[in-house]
Image: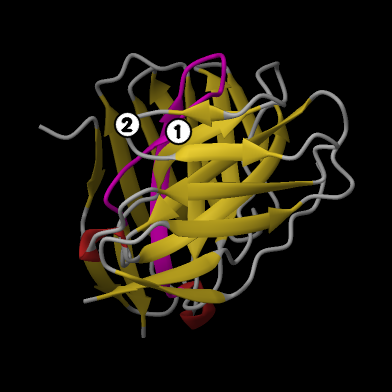
Amino acid sequence: DADVTQTPRNRITKTGKRIMLECSQTKGHDRMYWYRQDPGLGLRLIYYSFDVKDINKGEISDGYSVSRQAQAKFSLSLESAIPNQTALYFCATSDSTGVGYTFGSGTRLTVV
Amino acid sequence: DAKTTQPPSMDCAEGRAANLPCNHSTISGNEYVYWYRQIHSQGPQYIIHGLKNNETNEMASLIITEDRKSSTLILPHATLRDTAVYYCIVRVGGGSNYKLTFGKGTLLTVNP
């Protein structure tokens, strides 16, 4: 099994729908992150969490929310999806040193 | 965090060394240089990091200039599977505020 598992791998949804992307990890890491990648661009940080009780906004948090249900689980929600949220979404984890992030395989989301 | 400048693309012949440059002229004394790579829409993969000494691991070598204003990632014997986008990131190592910011990186194409 992968260290960081993202579900679903692919999703097509309609404008205005609420959607949740899930991430779970077996690394035992405290820190988890959600990134978004648009074609030809680098990754942009949406939200991050340094422990179960800690949630922080990244550079592009508008339109998104997160939930850290447990050390191993970090979910990203789009409350009302819009087409410009069509992107590749990555979850990542790191230990407290922050050296060497481990990324999931990504969720490709299309909003029509 | 200090900004980095990387060429948008580079080519390398299979079996030859790939040398990927990164400029980080505004780096401060406590900032590390990290390298990640992303193979076609997969999650980024950690390669190596360093502060001021040259570093080597099973994947690559990192050469940091004495003034620390630039660095070079070296893949000693590039293979077709090394074709990827390579990200150079400068970041304060560890600590409570640690998080990675990705730029556009360098697309390395290894040719047969």
Q: Residues within 10 Å of mark 2 (few under 14, many from 20)?
A: few
Instruction: Work out whether A103 lies above or below B32.
Output: below
Residue drawn at x 53%, y 27% as measured from the top left: B55
At numbered mark 1, what does the secondary structure look like: helix, strand or loop?
Answer: loop
Label 2, label 1: how far apart the Cα atoms are: 17 Å
Residue sitting nearer the eye, B29 or B43 = B29
Q: Quadrant of the C terminus of chain B?
A: bottom left
Q: Amino acid at mark 2?
A: Glu
Taking B25 as reference, is B7 left or right?
left
Residue drawn at x 43%, y 47% as measured from the top left: A76
Q: Is residue A18 magenta?
A: no
Q: Amino acid at mark 1?
A: Tyr
Counting from the top left corner in percent of width and height, residue B82 is at 30, 59
Residue sitting nearer the eye, B40 or A89 = B40
Range covered by the magenta-colored residues: A86-106
Instruction: Work out whether A24 lies above or below A91.
Output: above
Query: Residue furthest toward the front?
Result: B16
Q: Is residue A97 magenta?
A: yes
Q: Label 2, on which residue?
A: B58
Query: Residue furthest toward the left?
Result: A1
Q: Quadrant of the N terminus of chain B?
A: top right
Taking B101 as reference, is B27 left or right?
right
Counting from the top left corner in percent of width and height, residue B2 is at 82, 45
At numbered mark 2, what does the secondary structure look like: helix, strand or loop?
Answer: loop
Counting from the top left corner in percent of width and height, residue B93 is at 68, 23
Q: Label 1, on which residue?
A: A101
